[in-house]
Amino acid sequence: MKLPEIQRGKTRGVSVGGVRIGGGAPVSIQSMTTTPTSDVRATLAQIEALAQAGCDIVRVAAATPADTAALGEIVAAAPVPIVADVHFRFQRALESIEAGVHKIRLNPGNISDKQAVREVIDAAKDAGIPIRVGVNEGSVMDRTDGDRRTDQLAKPMDELMVETIADYLEVFIEADFHDLVLSAKSHDAMTTIAVNRALSERFDYPLHLGLTHAGTASTGLVRSVAALGTLLAEGIGDTVRISFAGDPVAEVAAAKELLASLRLRAREGAEIIACPTCGRTEADVATLAEEVRTALADVKPHVTVAVMGCIVNGPGEADGADAAACCGKGKAAIYRQGKYVRTVGEEEIVEALVTEVRSLLEERG
């Protein structure tokens, strides 16, 4: 039986270092460092951790001359393409391009002077790198003109963000510069969905999906997946960042799971399946599943491992998983690719599952 596939929208393609965005390329994963960019050692350490986790592109803050002065060394040593996030001072964009970054992010809300933008466009064109035009709720409101702000507040936020991007793009179109990526972010999932639907209908530039200031992992993850999952399922979006306060490496794991769940990226490593538990459960399924996940963290090929808490759902999952444990009180039946292998005591469950997985992978070569 052929599995359903998402029909992705057609967009232009741009190259960010060795990573292609849009133009039918796979959806890429991005994140951003939380270290001061001027601290080369700390920034490179975080970039390396993000790359190891599966991040395709990393964005760094280019806020000060000290930051951009560090970019040359960072770009040269980074294992993935680097994007400079520029706000307020267009000179930081010029310095970042000179340092060799692979993409620039500009915010129309704080770099609006057309001549300044044109200088950045010319530099990016000479360097052969794309520019991301990214807006969020805070950057589209005029705080200096009370009458204009009143007019803006009368419009839906998604319409205001699309209007801001469209106005900003005029200088790019005049310069015949189309190596662009667009993004429009809100902390609100429905606003993010609406604005990206509108952008995908109006422009053929690739879209960077994400939410802004979405919150901690507990709230930000749900909000991000609600918005990004909806858009990606509709074929909208070419690169994503799931963002929440905390360790950015966790963002990458969440993004990989989202893309794999939508069959937009092949799964890798051990996929742990665990039942939600109920009154029938007589084993600590959550602890067992986490111990199995940790023990198989080094596994690279995709393999499914089920930890089930009773005989109701257990046999079905055992049939579909590469290895499975159907737990009872103080023991578990171990299955390998649907076939019963043996019954082990509670203290042997993790070891038994790991043994079956490693044996199976060795046979696969």
Image (spheres, rainbow, N blue to C red):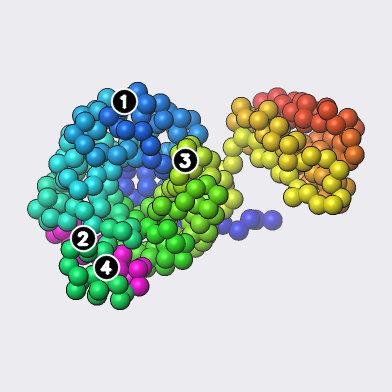
Hey, which quadrant is residue 203 in on the image? Answer: bottom left
Q: CA distance from mark 3 to mark 2?
A: 32 Å
Q: Inspect this view and state whether residue 238 appears.
A: no
Amino acid tagged 1: Val
Q: CA distance from mark 3 to mark 1?
A: 20 Å
First in sequence: mark 3 vs mark 2: 2
Counting residues from the start of the chain, the first of labels 3 and 1 encountered is: 1
Image point 88% across, 30% down: which residue?
345
Q: Secondary structure at mark 1?
A: helix
Q: Earlier in the sequence, mark 1 or mark 4?
A: 1
**Where the N terminus falls, by quadrant?**
bottom right
What span is colored magenta in the figure? 156-180
Element under disc 2: helix
Tell me which numbered mark, 3 or 4, is placed earlier along the sequence.
4
Question: Looking at the picture, does residue 7 appear above or below residue 68?
Answer: below
* Observer-nearest of 163 and 157: 157
Specify the quadrant of the image occupied by residue 113. Answer: bottom left
Q: Is residue 7 shown left or right of residue 21? A: right
Amino acid marked by disc 2: Tyr
Q: Residues within 10 Å of mark 3 (few under 14, many from 20)?
A: few
The residue indicated by pointer 2 is 168
Q: Residue under label 1, please give it.
A: 40
Q: Main secondary structure of the magenta part?
A: helix
Q: CA distance from mark 2 to mark 4?
A: 9 Å
142 horizontally vs 224: left or right: left
Q: Position of residue 328 (x, y in %)?
A: 89, 41
Q: Which residue is mark 4?
A: 163
* Mark 3 residue type: Gly
Residue plotted at (40% across, 53% down): 212
- Which residue is labeled 3 in the image? 246
